Amino acid sequence: MHAPDPAERFLTAAEQILRDIRTTQLPAIRHAATICSDAIAAGGLAHMFGTGHSRIPVEEIYPRHGSFPGFHPIIELSLTNHTQVVGNNGQRQAMYLEKLEGFGEVILRNFTFGAHDCMLVFSNSGVNGVVIDVALGAKVRGMKVIAVVSKAHCDGSPIKHSSGKRLTDIADVTIDNCSPLGDAMVQVEGLAEPVGPGSSIGYVTIVNMLKCLVAEDLTARGQPPLVLTSSTLIGSAASAALFDASYDEFRARIAPLYGMQPKKESL
């Protein structure tokens, strides 16, 4: 029997993340889903924010097939643009800005949040300035805060914000993406540093679990969501109509964020 190569060792580590989420995180995910369902059912929004690669779970929730309005992605490009790496909009700038205390409040000032809204904040470390700003700002505005972090990485990271808080100290609910301290999971012979980060696996798993629970809850409340659905399942005409209806509802839901009144026919 051959020794597992790095690809197999990554799969083993990824499988462990899924097992850990199943055995340790279901209560927190269910609690978070109820918070999101309450917000969406009341006509509010479940806002989502993340910096760096923590934008991945934000984009995973909406819009894409199998997703529905009610979740509001907040993606700040200056904090999440990775493809340039160097030069204009480079990675150094993004990494500098995500540590910049006060910048999160500048981002939040662009929106008028509603009375029924909640905020999901994704951060593997849970200590950088912007995510702490956003979480604190959400609490000041009366929102419940759901944190999705690597608990191992967060607990192992020094506090950086002047509030003296980690994201887990602020959140009403904390979900652990179950990735390890340092994120990378595979040691390669002859290479000092590990490779193969696991946080994205945990993130994507958690947000889709959350999404499924919220869909069930909204349907049980008599508010079945408008789910973006592939034409291969329901035909081109029905799929196109559902996409338009879903986008129209999303537009109506986010209109108050910018001081606009939603059109009644779009609700």
Image (spheres, rainbow, N blue to C red):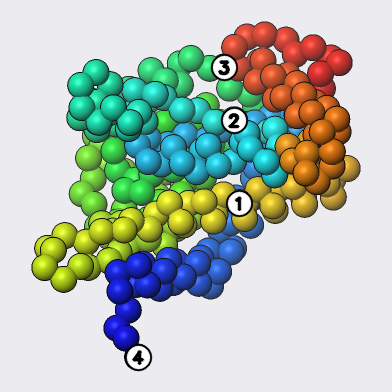
Q: Which of marks 1 and 3 is nearer the N terminus?
A: 3
Q: Where is residue 127 in the image (x, y as percent from the top left)?
A: 30, 43
Whole-number angstrom distance, CA of label 2 to CA of label 3: 13 Å
Mark 3 secondary-structure assignment: loop
Q: Name the residue under label 3.
A: 112
Mark 4 secondary-structure assignment: loop
Whole-number angstrom distance, CA of label 1 to CA of label 4: 36 Å
Amino acid at circle 2: His
Amino acid at circle 4: Met
Q: Name the residue under label 1.
A: 208
Which is closer to the viewer, label 1 or label 3? 1
Q: Position of residue 65 (x, y in %)?
A: 68, 41
Q: Which of 89 and 133 is in front in this view?
A: 89
Q: Where is residue 220 in the image (x, y as percent from the top left)?
A: 85, 50
Q: Mark 4 points at which residue?
A: 1
| Disc 3 crowd, CA 10 A, few/some/many (<14, 14-19, 20+) | some
Q: Viewed as shown, does residue 22 lie left or right of 77? A: right
Residue at the extreme top of the image, as rendered: 260
Q: Earlier in the sequence, mark 4 or mark 3?
A: 4
